[in-house]
């Protein structure tokens, strides 16, 4: 990773999510590494719990010259409680800056309770 290491890599999507009012938590290799169980991966997995309005604010905050995000796929994922991808434009960021946003399982009523905060709060 370039552009300031792991902290900068993590803050790019989490700061935009926080500004849009979208609750999020880090999962996958970033989360396991934080808990001292390193895994190697070139992406960042986030679980988000947006409302339609906050998802629109988040997608609107992604400059098209820096990110590709398919709004139709994102809103379809919101309806299905599934996942969608946000991809960087390779000219502006390292090829490892890939984000997958996954909605929390509906069977879990409060997936964010007790989760340690990483990044902007």
Image (spheres, rainbow, N blue to C red):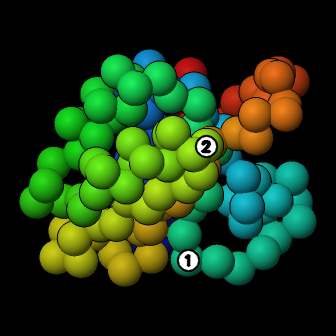
Position in image of residue 35 (x %, y %): 86, 53
Q: Nearer the viewer, residue 57 or 97?
A: 57
**Dot 2 crowding, Cα within 10 Å, few <14, some 14–19, many 20+:** some
Position in image of residue 91 (x %, y %): 16, 76
Which tag is nearer the camera, tag 2 or tag 1? 2
Q: Within the image, what quadrant is residue 117 found in? A: top right
Q: Residue at x 44, y 67 (%)?
A: 98
Visible residue check, residue 11: no
- Mark 1 falls on what kind of element? loop
Residue 67, above or below 60: below
Q: Residue at x 84, y 31 (%)?
A: 108
Q: Nearer the viewer, residue 9 or 21?
A: 21
Position in image of residue 1 (x %, y %): 46, 73
Please state if 103 lies on the left or on the right of 70 as rendered: right
Q: Within the image, what quadrant is residue 36 found in? A: bottom right
Q: Residue at x 23, y 36 (%)?
A: 61
Please state if 121 lies on the left or on the right of 12 as rendered: right
Upstream in the sequence, badge 2 or badge 1?
1
Q: Are marks 2 and 1 in contact (CB under 8 Å)?
A: no
Residue 120, above or below 95: above
Q: Residue at x 38, y 32 (%)?
A: 55
- Indicate which disc residue 27 carries: none
Residue 117, above or below 11: above
Give the mark count: 2
- Indicate which disc residue 42 carries: 1
Q: CA distance from mark 2 to mark 1?
A: 24 Å
Position in image of residue 22 (x %, y %): 49, 26
User: The C terminus lies in which quarter of the figure?
Assistant: top right
Q: Within the image, what quadrant is residue 95 found in? A: bottom left
Residue wearing tag 2: 81
């Amino acid at each position: 990773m370039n552009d300031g290491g792991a902290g900068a890599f993590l803050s790019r999507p989490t700061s935009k999510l926080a500004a849009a009012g979208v609750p999020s938590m880090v999962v996958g290799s970033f989360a396991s590494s934080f808990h001292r169980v390193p895994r190697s991966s070139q992406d960042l997995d986030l679980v988000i719990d947006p409302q339609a309005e906050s998802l629109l604010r988040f997608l609107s905050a992604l400059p098209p010259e820096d990110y590709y995000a398919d709004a139709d796929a994102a809103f379809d994922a919101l309806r299905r409680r599934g996942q969608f991808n946000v991809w960087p434009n390779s000219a502006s960021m390292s090829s490892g800056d890939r984000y997958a946003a996954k909605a929390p399982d509906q069977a879990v009523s409060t997936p964010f309770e007790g989760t340690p905060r990483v990044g902007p709060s």
